[in-house]
Amino acid sequence: MDKMLGKTDRNLIEQLICAKSGHKRKEVTVGPQFGVDVSIVNLPGKMALAATSDPLSLIPSLGLEESAWLSVQLLANDMATTGFAPQYAQFVLNLPAGFSKNDFKIYWDYIHTFCADIGVAVTGGHTGFIEGQNSTIAGGGTFFAIAPENQLLVSRNARPGDTILVTKECALSSASILALSFPQTIKNKLGVENHQKACDLFYKTTSLLDGLVAVGHIPRYDDVTAMHDVTEGGVLGAIYELVSASGNGAVVYNHKIPVEQVQQKICGLFGIDPRYSIGAGSMIITCKKGSAAKVIERLTAINIPCCEVGEIKEKESGIKLVENKKKKDLEYKEEDPYWAAFFKALKEGWK
């Protein structure tokens, strides 16, 4: 049996999950699809329900607070791609049998606090302790939001001529988690200052505000066409997914991709290309031609860096990366290099 790490590959999603998704209901306007972060179900009164699900993190080397932060923010990041904040949550906790009640209390207190901070009400779920559960995944969660059906964005809405924007920087989450998980090694090899800078990136791994500010509230702007948060596969993987979901082509300019020195150093130490590594906290945004400056201005006004990196093209153009003045097909990596690097470091005893 083939072994896979991280997200399920595209073919399996399209040929199995998307093709076999239960009963077809006319009110489901957005169902399972590669590169789409949320599902949309139309409700009475021209309203719609948006839903998104993700694993819950429980990483001992990271810490209980940090694990809870990731659990909540990664879900919120997906919902942010609609242009609306999450409102309700369901959590399924499959905790290790050896996980103490005190640690569970600490972990859940943080889940509660982080949900409350962004206006999310926990409406239910399931909690259990399982023998042999040694994963860094402690179950799964689903966030919901109700909003006007004609205002909810999805990543497949991008259109030819749209400008592609990226907020913040590449590899925010992978660089910070590696720094927090292997502090001694990174301090020894890269120095204390680089270690601290990488650790400081951790609480930038939210893109909720990125999405909400990009589209605005009152007034709500109509220049943003689609958004996709950066997770496994990094910034380049997220761009590829958004473009594929929308059925278009694209041109992306490598020299415009935002990669800071600390991420380059951390990722270099672990043999990772930061452009393709887990980058929660960054958001891919497409906007109408000629409106990029206005969207960037809204974001930079609240200290969220944003830059233009490419353009959506017709499907026949393909998805291209311009690197060293040469245009080539943008590679899509089915497996994020972060996972192999993380477990290799554990195996080799990096501290």
Image: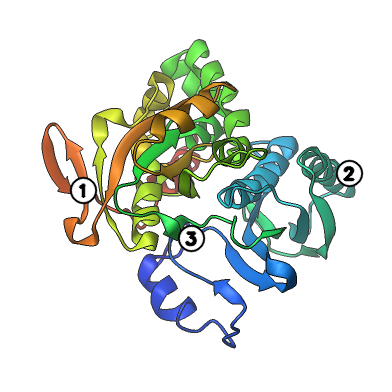
Place of residue 250 in the rendered image (x, y in percent of width and height, measured from the top left): 26, 50
Which of pointers 1 and 2 indicates the residue nearer the eye? 1
Q: Quadrant of the C terminus?
A: top right
* Residue 27 position by quadrant: bottom right
Point out the tag, 1 or 3, that comes first from the N-terminus.
3
Can you tell which mark lies on residue 36? 3
**Type of amino acid under label 2:** Asn
- Residue with the mark numbered 1: 320
Residue at the image position 44 percent from the left and 43 percent from the top: 284
Residue at the image position 34 percent from the left and 46 percent from the top: 162
* Residue 143 position by quadrant: bottom right
Place of residue 83 in the rendered image (x, y in percent of width and height, measured from the top left): 60, 47
Can you tell which mark lies on residue 212? none
- Could you tell me if residue 22 is visible in this image? yes
Point out the tag, 3 or 2, that comes first from the N-terminus.
3
In the picture, measured across the screen, residue 27 lies left or right of residue 292, that is: right
Place of residue 43 in the rendered image (x, y in percent of width and height, measured from the top left): 71, 72
**Type of amino acid under label 1:** Lys
Q: Secondary structure at mark 2?
A: helix
